[in-house]
Image: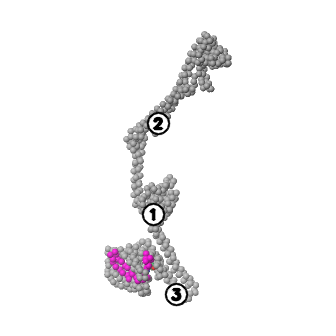
C-alpha cells in the first residue's frame, strides 16, 4: 500500500510538473511573439521616417540586424538589405504588403520548415505610397524549448527528487496508522474516519467466526463422543486420502498405533486390498474388502462422500468379522461333510436295493442284503439325529427346562442303556463316586454322558473296562468317564471335538464323528467344561466339570453298575 501511495503521489507530481512546463512554454511563446511584433512596429516607424527624409541613403547606413525591404506601391522591390532587389519577385501579393497598401500597416508570420524558424513581418506605408517592411525571425516554440532544455532538465530533476522525497515521506505517514491497527481488537483502533465502516465489518465478522468456531467445536466433541464408543471402526478421508476423522476402534481393527492427524489413511494400514478399496471409493464407487490375517478377519466398507455432485472424499467402516467368517467356514465345511456322510450309506442302500430288484438273489442271501439296508438306514437315522441335536445346540434356543439334575442317577441311566453293547464287547461298566446335584438341562446332561460312555465302550478292547466317577470338587460337580481302550494320539486330542473328525476311520466303530461335537456344544450350553486326558494304547479319561451350584449337594454312594 505504501508503494502504491508513493507511486501515485510521484506520478501526480510529475504530471503536474510536465503540464506546468508545457503551459509556461506556451505563455512565453505568446509573450515573445507580441514583444517581437511591438519591436518590429517601432523599428518600422523609425526607419520609415528616415526613408521619407533620405531615401536609400538612409537605408544603406542602417546596421544589418533585421531584414529591411522597401517596396514600391506597385509591389516592385526597391531595396533589400539581404538580397538583390532586381532578383526579387513582385511583393504586391505578400500578405503584409497587401494589408499595408490598403490600410497603412500590415503584419504576417511565415514558417520555414527547412530552417525550423518563424519569420515575423511588419509593413508600413509611406506618404508616397511605397511600403517599408521590417522582418525578424523568432525561434519556434520547439527551438525555444530546446534552447531552454538544460535549465529545464535541471529544474525537472530537482523537482522530481523533491517529489520523490516528499512522496516517500507522505506515503509512510499515511500508511503508518493503518499498519498500527490491532485487528484482534478493532474496537480499540483509532484511525481514519473513513476506515470506521471497515473496522465495524471486521468486528462483526470476528464475532461471527467465534460463534461458528464454538459451534464447530461442540459438534466435533459430540461426534468424537459418539464414534469413540463404537465397536465398529470409522474413518473419514478427503480427496487426497488425508484422515479427517478416525475413531479408536478403527485404529485397533486396522492395526495402527496412533491416529495419523492430517496424514494419509494408508499410514493406518498398508495392505494392498485396503489401498485398492480406498482408491475405488475416491473414484466414486462403493467397495467392500476382507482383510485377513492369521487370527482375525476384518471387513472394510468404503463409500464415496459426495458434495455438489462431486466425490469429495470417502467414509470407511471397519468391522470385525472374525467370528462370522469362522462360522461361515465351519458351516461350509459342515455342509460338505454332511453331504459326504449321507452319500456313503445312501449309495450302499441303493446298490443293495438294485441287486434285490433284479430278483436274481438267492432266497438265502435276501436276509444278508436286507440286513445291510437295515444297518445303513440306522446309520443314516443316527447321523440325521446327531445333526439335528447339533443344530439345536448351535441355534442356542430353548433346549428344555433347567432343573436339578442328579448326575449320579443320570450316569446310572446311561450305563443301563449301554449294558447290552458293553456285554457284547466284553467290557465292564462301573459307576463310582457320590451323588451330585446340579442345576442343568437333564436331556443335554444325558446326551453328553451317553456320547462319552458310548465312545468308551466302542473304542475299548474286549475285556476292557469303563469307569464313570461322579464327585463334587471345589470347582464344581464333576463326572469323569475313564476307559482302558485304544486311547487318542496326542496330536489328535485337540481335534477330536471337531465335527466329523475321526482319528482312524477304519476303527470308527460306525460312529458319525459328531458325538464329541455334541458333547462340546452341550457342555458350552450348560456352562460346563470338558477336559481330556489320554494315552495311546492305554485309554482315555473325559471329565465334565459343571459350574459350582450354591444349592449343590453331594451324597456319598458307592453303587456299581456293570
Ligand atoms: P464317533 O461317532 O466317530 O465316535 P466322536 O465325535 O464321538 O465320533 O469321536 C471322534 C473320534 O474321537 C472318534 O472317531 C475316535 O477316533 C475318537 N474317540 C472318541 N472317544 C474315544 C475314546 N474314548 N477312546 C479312543 N478314541 C476316542
Relative height, residue 205 to residue 531 (above, below): above
- Residue for badge 3: 367
- Which residue is the site of mark 1? 319
**Above or below for 390 versus 70:** below
Instruction: Give the camera-side residue of 380 and 12.
Output: 12
Which SS class for mark 1? Answer: strand
Q: Is residue 2 magenta?
A: no
The residue sitting at 38% across, 79% down in the picture is 480
Disc nearer the start of the sequence (2/1): 2
Residue 555: percent from the left, percent from the top?
A: 32, 80
Which quarter of the figure is the C terminus placed in?
Answer: bottom left
Q: Which residues are magenta?
A: 467-494
Is there any visible trace of residue 237 in the rendered image? no
- For marks 3 and 1 on the same chain, the one whose residue lies earlier in the sequence: 1
Image quarter of residue 201? top left
**Is 112 displayed left or right of 543 in the figure?**
right
Camera-near label (2 vs 1) is 2
Q: Position of residue 488 (x, y in %)?
A: 43, 79
Q: At 40% from the left edge and 56% from the top edge, which residue is drawn?
A: 222
Give me the disc on residue 6: 2
Amino acid at each position: 500500500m505504501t508503494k502504491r501511495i508513493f507511486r501515485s503521489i510521484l506520478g501526480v507530481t510529475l504530471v503536474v510538473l510536465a503540464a506546468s512546463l508545457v503551459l509556461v512554454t506556451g505563455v512565453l511563446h505568446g509573450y515573445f511573439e507580441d514583444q517581437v511584433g511591438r519591436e518590429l512596429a517601432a523599428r518600422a516607424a523609425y526607419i520609415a521616417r528616415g526613408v521619407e527624409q533620405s531615401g536609400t541613403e538612409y537605408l544603406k547606413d542602417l546596421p544589418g540586424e533585421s531584414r529591411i525591404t522597401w517596396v514600391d506601391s506597385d509591389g516592385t522591390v526597391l531595396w533589400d538589405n539581404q538580397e538583390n532587389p532586381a532578383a526579387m519577385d513582385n511583393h504586391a501579393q505578400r500578405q503584409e504588403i497587401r494589408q499595408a497598401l490598403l490600410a497603412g500597416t500590415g503584419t504576417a508570420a511565415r514558417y520555414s520548415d527547412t530552417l525550423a524558424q518563424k519569420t515575423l513581418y511588419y509593413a508600413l506605408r509611406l506618404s508616397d505610397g511605397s511600403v517599408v517592411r521590417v522582418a525578424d525571425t523568432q525561434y519556434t516554440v520547439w527551438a525555444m524549448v530546446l534552447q531552454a532544455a538544460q535549465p529545464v532538465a535541471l529544474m525537472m530533476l530537482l523537482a522530481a527528487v523533491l517529489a520523490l522525497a516528499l512522496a516517500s515521506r507522505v506515503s509512510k505517514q499515511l500508511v503508518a496508522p493503518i499498519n498500527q491497527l490491532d485487528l484482534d481488537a478493532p474496537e480499540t483502533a483509532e484511525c481514519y474516519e473513513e476506515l470506521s465502516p471497515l473496522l465495524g465489518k471486521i468486528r462483526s465478522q470476528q464475532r461471527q467466526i467465534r460463534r461458528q468456531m464454538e459451534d464447530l467445536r461442540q459438534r466435533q466433541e459430540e461426534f468424537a463422543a459418539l464414534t469413540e464408543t463404537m465397536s465398529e471402526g470409522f474413518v473419514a478421508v478427503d480427496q487426497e486420502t488425508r484422515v479427517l476423522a478416525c475413531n479408536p476402534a478403527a485404529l485397533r481393527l486396522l492395526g495402527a498405533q496412533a491416529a495419523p492427524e492430517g496424514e494419509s489413511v494408508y499410514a493406518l494400514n498398508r495392505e494392498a486390498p485396503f489401498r485398492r478399496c480406498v482408491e475405488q471409493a475416491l473414484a466414486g464407487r462403493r467397495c467392500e474388502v476382507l482383510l485377513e490375517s492369521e487370527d482375525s478377519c476384518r471387513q472394510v466398507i468404503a463409500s464415496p462422500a459426495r458434495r455438489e455432485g462431486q466425490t469429495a472424499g470417502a467414509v470407511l467402516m471397519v468391522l470385525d468379522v472374525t467370528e462370522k467368517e469362522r462360522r461361515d467356514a465351519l458351516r461350509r465345511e459342515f455342509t460338505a461333510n454332511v453331504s459326504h456322510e449321507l452319500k456313503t450309506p445312501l449309495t450302499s442302500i441303493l446298490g443293495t436295493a438294485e441287486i434285490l430288484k433284479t430278483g436274481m438273489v438267492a432266497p438265502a442271501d435276501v436276509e444278508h442284503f436286507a440286513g445291510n439296508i437295515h444297518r445303513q438306514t440306522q446309520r443314516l437315522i443316527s447321523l440325521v439325529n446327531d445333526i439335528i441335536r447339533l443344530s439345536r445346540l448351535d441355534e442356542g434356543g430353548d433346549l428344555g427346562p433347567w432343573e436339578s439334575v442328579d448326575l449320579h442317577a443320570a450316569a446310572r441311566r446311561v450305563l443301563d442303556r449301554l449294558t447290552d453293547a458293553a456285554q457284547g464287547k466284553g467290557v465292564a461298566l462301573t459307576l463310582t463316586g457320590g451323588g451330585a446335584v446340579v442345576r442343568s438341562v437333564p436331556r443335554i446332561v444325558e446326551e453328553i454322558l451317553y456320547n462319552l460312555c458310548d465312545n468308551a465302550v466302542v473304542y475299548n478292547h474286549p475285556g476292557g473296562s469303563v469307569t464313570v466317577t461322579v464327585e463334587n470338587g471345589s470347582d464344581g460337580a464333576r463326572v469323569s468317564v475313564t476307559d482302558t481302550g485304544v486311547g487318542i494320539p496326542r496330536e489328535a486330542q485337540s481335534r477330536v471335538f471337531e465335527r466329523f473328525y475321526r482319528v482312524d476311520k477304519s476303527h470308527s466303530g460306525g460312529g458319525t464323528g459328531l458325538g464329541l461335537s455334541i458333547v462340546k456344544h452341550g457342555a458350552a450350553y450348560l456352562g460346563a467344561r470338558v477336559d481330556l486326558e489320554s494315552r495311546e494304547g492305554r485309554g482315555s479319561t473325559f471329565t465334565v466339570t459343571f459350574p459350582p451350584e450354591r444349592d449343590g449337594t453331594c451324597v456319598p454312594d458307592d453303587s456299581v453298575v456293570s
